Image (cartoon, grey):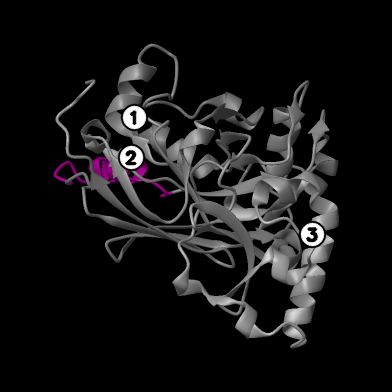
Amino acid sequence: MKLISYNNEGQDQLAVLVADRVYDMETLHPDLPGNMSMFLAYWDENLQLAKGGVALIQEGKISASKSKPLDAVELLAPVPFPTSCRDGYAFRQHVAAARRNRGVEMIAQFDQYPIFYFTNHHSITGPGTLTLMPDHFHNLDFELEVAILISKTGRNIRAEDAQEYIGGLMIMNDWSARRLQMEEMLLNLGPAKGKDFATSIGPWLVTLDELQAFEVAPKEGHRGVNWNLAMTCKVNGVEVSRGSLADMDWTFAEIIERASYGVTLYPGDVIGSGTVGTGCFLELNGTGKLNNPDYEAQWLQPGDEVEMEIEQLGVLQNTIEQEDTEWSIL
């Protein structure tokens, strides 16, 4: 099932997407809540009711006249108001390439435990236009990732049990202002201002039952499951990145285990995978320079369109523009 949130007269409206038609939750069943926050409060019960409604749509018992075409709604983030947002560091290929490009050895601790950082859950956005400050355009970057939604409360969750806490998968773009990020991390703290201005997720949340056919075993020595889903990113229609979610070294299950150690995870928490190999200009530019000293680095510019496509998860499209101000903190 594909869950979307869209702008309904200034309020976030939860709906399902079936054959490019948008059906509000109340259309599926009168007891279903109209927004994601309320849906998450009783996830298991609401999910079963919603699945029953989708079955009625597919059987023709709920008319398409009670729906809207997808292109007639303004999509928001599927989870417009996450309770928190963590981002992992799960792809060894990305970490190794980024360190190689900086002339440093691969860090041994990567293979010992999964890590993550907290980003600004109040800056979550969906598809559409993003307006950023001038400083953000000093080496502005995308990061091609997948995120999961935590759908029920849990603490000290073992990796073997973690799957039941995942509500679904969605595309995630962890926008990065690299100059700000590099400045603050010289003080061994962060990332903060280099990341806190925007994180885009969407265009919808895909529940795990739709992805069972794509489950694959984790890499040797790891626990949980991965999904064999192709991942690409285009900038202004030109493909710049390609990878697969199956390349995750640390699984979401293992990240959940560490994140929940001594800490309660709540419905509405969002956790990103970290960047897939080749999944950002920082890595691509470094590799280009390593191979060719005359390589011209590429960064995002005002007016650029970034399209992330992940198999089964859709296309997350954002256009970036610069705010009309000269204010700088650099």
Of the numbered discs in the image, which one, if any, rests on residue 280? none
Q: Which residue appears at 68% of the width and 85% of the height?
A: 63
Please name whichever residue, 141 or 268, is drawn nearer the observer in this view of the structure.
268
Q: Which residue is mark 3?
A: 47
Above or below 74: residue 42: above
| Residue extending furthest toward the front | 9
The magenta stretch is 278-295
Q: Amino acid at mark 2?
A: Leu
Left or right: 233 with respect to 145? left
- Residue 324 lies in quadrant: top left
Structural crowding at the residue carrying mark 2, measured as other residues with C-alpha within 10 Å and reported as few (<14), some (14–19) or many (≥20): many
Q: Which residue is mark 2?
A: 282
Label 3–label 1 contact, CB within 8 A:
no
Image quarter hosting the C terminus:
top left
Residue 327 part of the magenta-drawn span: no
Q: What's the CA distance linking mark 2 and mark 3?
A: 39 Å
Q: What's the CA distance linking mark 3 and mark 1?
A: 46 Å
Of the numbered discs in the image, which one, if any, rests on residue 102? 1
Q: Secondary structure at mark 2?
A: helix
Image quarter hosting the N terminus:
bottom right
